[in-house]
Image (cartoon, helix red, strand yellow):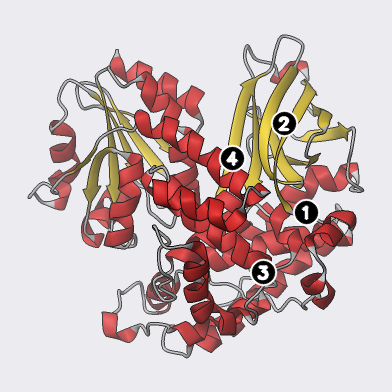
């Protein structure tokens, strides 16, 4: 499915107000902080079980992550957590493993103890939500705002597919914009949202669609060719490659608007922009920040329509975050010096150095990465040949891609789980393919570790077809005898995955 360009009107006033004015006007700003959140969940008898996990996800826009926290409800249905924040005001998505599909939104404020209560109906949906500070939002829109995002994702117009692979990039953008506007209409249907919540959800959806589709133009056009040519695959010469100037659509995305800081897609959008092969922005490495940002502005300023603003701050933080997240590599002495010289003790320095402490701890237990040659066998024998290398071990196979945000989020979450099996008969196998550019894939696997394989497109397609799945992340769990015990699409959480692995060990 192809998508969208958002022609949102610029809010010019926001561009010229200082950050203090943002804070005074109730808009979020980048700020290091913490939030205490406690709550109680009411569960009907029909849904009760021995243990229920609460999942909280909060955007960390400056370091390019949606940070996930989990905790068990106690016997009275209560929980309490302390969260790190990167904005003075945040939106936190909350759910439980009773129904992972229904998430509610809870506004959070730095330094404030947030108290929430919510309850489930018999059908597994959350029907009541109370918070000690709703930030001006209604109970109904906090319950259904994230659901609206999902409805926009699932919407299909039913119109015949249009061939776009042989047209100008601008035609693709116009088509994408029309699709986005169609989906925006969903926000005007009940349950009704306020104008502010509609704007936040639409921004969030727009950013997700851009980094998931427009930034991935080549693969989108391969899919478009296949869908409009009886599922045939194109010759590479039939797909045009965009150039930097084609990315002038960025100026229509209102990237400096502080409301973007509420969006769960903003961290992923910024990371994908930094990794985009068409823009080819330089890596920051040990380059002094003023020099690096000058080079970046030389590429982006005419595309974004500005050489100042919030988004350039976002790019700096996310440039270091690429190293953190992609390679699980702490800052060098020179990088720390550059950060301190540039920020001079300000909040953005605190955020980066706080994150660096976390990465230093994770790096100490980082699993060694092993890049394997693909076995020289037919596609039919490929999975058996891979599994046979790890005889006597339970094998967890992870199909993933560098562009797949849920894949990368699952890898972050599973780091603690893998530690528990570090000295046991378990092998973690990771399968990638050419939709993940080789150089980017090589950087990512440094932070993932484990046994890595990079298949051809043909090999990848055969395995997906033979195991009958098309979405990633997907996991195959084999026992010590090489027998497939579980196949799971979408990461089920550490608790569930741990049970599958322990069962495969017996």
Q: Residue furthest left?
A: 376
Find residue 124 and name its label: 2
Does label 3 or label 4 sit earlier along the sequence?
A: 4
Q: Position of residue 395 (x, y in %)?
A: 26, 29
Spatial distance from mark 4 to mark 2, Cα to Cα?
A: 25 Å
Q: Residues within 10 Å of mark 2 (few under 14, many from 20)?
A: some
Is residue 417 in view?
A: yes
Q: Of discs 4 and 1, which sits in the foreground?
A: 1
Camera-nearest residue between 506 and 281: 281
Q: Please name the residue that numbered disc 3 is placed on.
A: 255
Q: Position of residue 256 (x, y in %)?
A: 70, 68
Does label 1 or label 3 sit earlier along the sequence?
A: 1
Q: Of discs 2 and 1, which sits in the foreground?
A: 1
Residue 128 position (above or below residue 91) = above
Q: Residues within 10 Å of mark 3 (few under 14, many from 20)?
A: many
Q: Secondary structure at mark 3?
A: loop
Q: Of discs 4 and 2, which sits in the foreground?
A: 4
- Please tell me which residue is depicted at 60% across the width and 84% down the height of the picture: 174
Where residue 112 sits, quadrant-wise, is top right
- Please tell me which residue is depicted at 58% across the width and 55% down the height of the picture: 267
Q: Residue furthest top?
A: 75
Find residue 28 and name its label: 1
Q: Secondary structure at mark 1?
A: loop
Q: From the image, which quarter does the C terminus lie in?
A: top left
Residues under numbered marks 3 and 4 in contact, where contact means CB atoms less than 8 Å apart: no
Does label 2 or label 1 sit earlier along the sequence?
A: 1
Camera-nearest residue between 267 and 342: 342
Spatial distance from mark 4 to mark 1, Cα to Cα?
A: 17 Å
Q: Of discs 3 and 2, which sits in the foreground?
A: 3
Q: Residues within 10 Å of mark 1 (few under 14, many from 20)?
A: many
Is residue 490 in view?
A: no
């Amino acid at each position: 499915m192809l998508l969208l360009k958002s022609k949102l009107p610029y809010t010019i006033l926001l561009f010229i107000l200082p950050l203090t004015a943002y804070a005074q006007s109730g808009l979020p700003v980048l700020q290091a902080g913490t939030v205490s959140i406690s709550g109680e969940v009411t569960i009907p008898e029909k849904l009760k079980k021995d243990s229920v996990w609460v999942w909280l996800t909060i955007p960390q826009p400056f370091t390019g992550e949606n940070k996930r926290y989990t905790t068990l409800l106690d016997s009275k249905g209560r929980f309490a957590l302390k969260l790190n924040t990167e904005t003075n005001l945040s939106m936190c998505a909350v759910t439980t493993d009773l129904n992972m599909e229904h998430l509610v939104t809870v506004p959070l404020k730095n330094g404030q103890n947030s108290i929430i209560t919510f309850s489930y109906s018999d059908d597994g949906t959350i029907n009541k939500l109370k918070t000690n500070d709703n930030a001006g939002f209604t109970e109904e829109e906090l319950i259904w705002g994230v659901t609206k995002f999902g409805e926009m994702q699932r919407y299909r117009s039913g119109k015949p597919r249009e061939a776009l692979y042989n047209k100008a990039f601008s035609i693709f953008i116009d088509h994408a914009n029309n699709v986005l506007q169609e989906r925006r209409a969903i926000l005007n249907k009940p349950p009704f949202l306020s104008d502010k919540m509609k704007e936040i959800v639409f921004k969030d959806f727009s950013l997700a669609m851009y980094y998931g589709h427009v930034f991935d133009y080549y693969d989108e056009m391969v899919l478009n060719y296949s869908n409009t040519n009886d599922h045939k695959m194109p010759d590479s010469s039939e797909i045009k490659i965009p150039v930097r100037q084609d990315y002038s659509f960025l100026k229509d995305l209102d990237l400096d608007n502080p409301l973007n800081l509420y969006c769960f897609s903003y961290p992923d959008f910024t990371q994908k922009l930094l990794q985009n092969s068409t823009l080819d922005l330089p890596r920051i490495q040990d380059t002094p920040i003023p020099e690096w940002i000058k080079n970046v502005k030389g590429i982006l300023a005419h595309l974004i329509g500005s050489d100042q603003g919030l988004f350039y701050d976002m790019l700096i933080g996310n440039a270091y975050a690429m190293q953190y997240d992609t390679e699980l590599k702490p800052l060098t002495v020179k990088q720390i010096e550059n950060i301190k010289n540039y920020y001079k003790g300000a909040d953005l320095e605190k955020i980066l150095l706080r994150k660096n402490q976390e990465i230093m701890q994770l790096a100490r237990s980082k699993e060694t990465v092993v890049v394997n040659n693909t076995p020289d066998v037919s596609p039919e024998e490929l999975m058996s040949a891979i599994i046979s290398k790890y005889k006597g071990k339970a094998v967890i196979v992870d199909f993933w891609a560098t562009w797949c945000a849920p894949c990368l989020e699952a890898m972050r979450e599973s780091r603690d789980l893998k530690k528990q099996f570090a000295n046991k008969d378990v092998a973690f196998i990771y399968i990638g393919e050419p939709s993940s550019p080789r150089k980017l894939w090589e950087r990512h696997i440094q932070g993932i570790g484990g046994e890595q394989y990079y298949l051809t497109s043909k090999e990848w397609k055969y395995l997906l077809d033979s195991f009958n799945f098309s979405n990633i992340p997907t996991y195959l769990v084999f026992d010590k005898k090489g027998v497939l015990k579980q196949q799971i699409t979408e990461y089920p959480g550490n608790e569930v995955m741990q049970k599958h692995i322990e069962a495969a060990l017996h």
